[in-house]
Amino acid sequence: MSNLTTMIEVQYQNRFDWDEKTQGEILSSFYYGYILTHLPGGILSQKFGGKHTMGLGILSTAIFTLMTPYVAYKGSRPLTILRFVEGLGEGTTFPALYTLLAQWAPPDEKGKLSTVVFAGVQIGNIFSNFLSGFTIQYIPGGWPNVFYFFGVISLIWFVLWCLFVYNDPNSHPFISDMERDYLKQSIGSLKRKKDLPSTPWISILTSWPVWALIIVEAGNDWGGFTIISDLPKYMSDVLHFSIMETNIVHSGTVGPGLGVMCASFIGCNKTIATLCFTLGVALMGFCYPSIHINSLDLSPNYAPTIMALANGICCLSGMATPYVAGILTPNIKNRFRMASGILDYDGFYDDIIYNIWDIWIR
């Protein structure tokens, strides 16, 4: 939901008369709020559990999503403020998710279960972009219906989340004793914040594996944010995709990869460009059972705090990406080529650092 505004801005920038600088401010404002609540979200989820922390974060995002069309017509400044506040609510969700994974994912199944969970991000992106393009092009009322639809869906999700999700196996009334005992034996008894010693900040901040994780996640996020912010413009202005075509292809391009660089050099061939983007997305799948769950390996009890620290710092790339992409060059084709080059070099050196300091797998 938080990135639906990206597609709307690309397709309706003339209607709202938003220049590149204004669009960059609107896109970045979400991450300014997002980064501020990461650490508080990790601390809250450790103390009160991941269920309510994540649920309330999504609820706030749903409400602000419903408000977006009305606020957009009020001008770019009110929309920027709305996106900032929306980011404040969304920032608590991923630390809370890691709290739940630490409580529910056994070590032998952690990679598999975490991949299934994080795949939901990609599945949501596929359906949201496809449905957005379909709604804009074929349903009366146009783009505001996209925000109304996903806002209502998220409100329904919140109700179901409150009814069926529990913080840990001990508090779940419906699982069998056998399953509860298995989870206790395999995971151990993780404690809430009130029962834990103070967060070992010095140990965390001086840990090379933690900083290796931060660096590689920053590179990964830079690629994702570059795709989200700049790819729709490239498809629309260079490849001349229609609204529907842009949303269908963009629905499968969330992560960085070598294919992004290739696509920027193939000219205006839609088929080859789409194949290159798809290759990039396929390579992105390796990140989910690896770097995205390393905070659980480093310290299950403090995984939300480590994740919040890493992801919060990584969000700086989300704030910088729209501005960097906008000032590189006014030519959209050359701009995307240069941005993808930065992405490839960034990913290459991040992987070297990550593998050098990846001592927790040895």
Image (cartoon, helix red, strand yellow):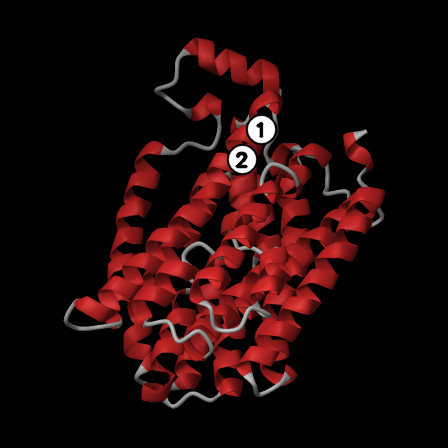
Asked if disc 2 and disc 1 are in contact, CB closer than 8 Å, the reply is yes
Is residue 252 visible to us here?
yes
**What is the three-letter code of the residue carrying label 2?**
Ser
Labels in figure, total: 2
Q: Amino acid at mark 1?
A: Lys
Task: Rate crowding at label 2 as few (under 14), some (14 to 19) or many (20 or more) other CA atoms within 10 Å.
Answer: some
Q: CA distance from mark 2 to mark 1?
A: 6 Å
Judge whether 62 appears above or below 137 on screen. Answer: above
Of the pair 287 and 150, the residue shown nearer to us: 287
* Residue 150, horizontal then vertical, whole percent: 29, 58
Residue at image coords 40%, 57%: 251
157 or 118: nearer the viewer: 118
Foreground residue, 36 or 274? 274
Q: What residue is drawn where x is 68% and y is 46%?
A: 306
Per the image, the residue denoted by label 2 is 114
**Can the viewer see residue 201 in this picture?**
no
Image coordinates for residue 174, horizontal then vertical, percent:
34, 20
* Above or below for 23 versus 131: below
Is 146 in front, or is 280?
A: 280
Q: Which mark is residue 110?
A: 1
Give coordinates of residue 198: x percent, y percent. Answer: 73, 41
Q: Residue at x 76, y 46 (%)?
A: 210
Q: Residue furthest top?
A: 178
**Quadrant in the rendering for residue 244:** bottom left
Secondary structure under badge 1?
Answer: helix
Q: Quadrant of residue 290?
A: top right
Seen in the image, is 193 located left or right of residue 208? left
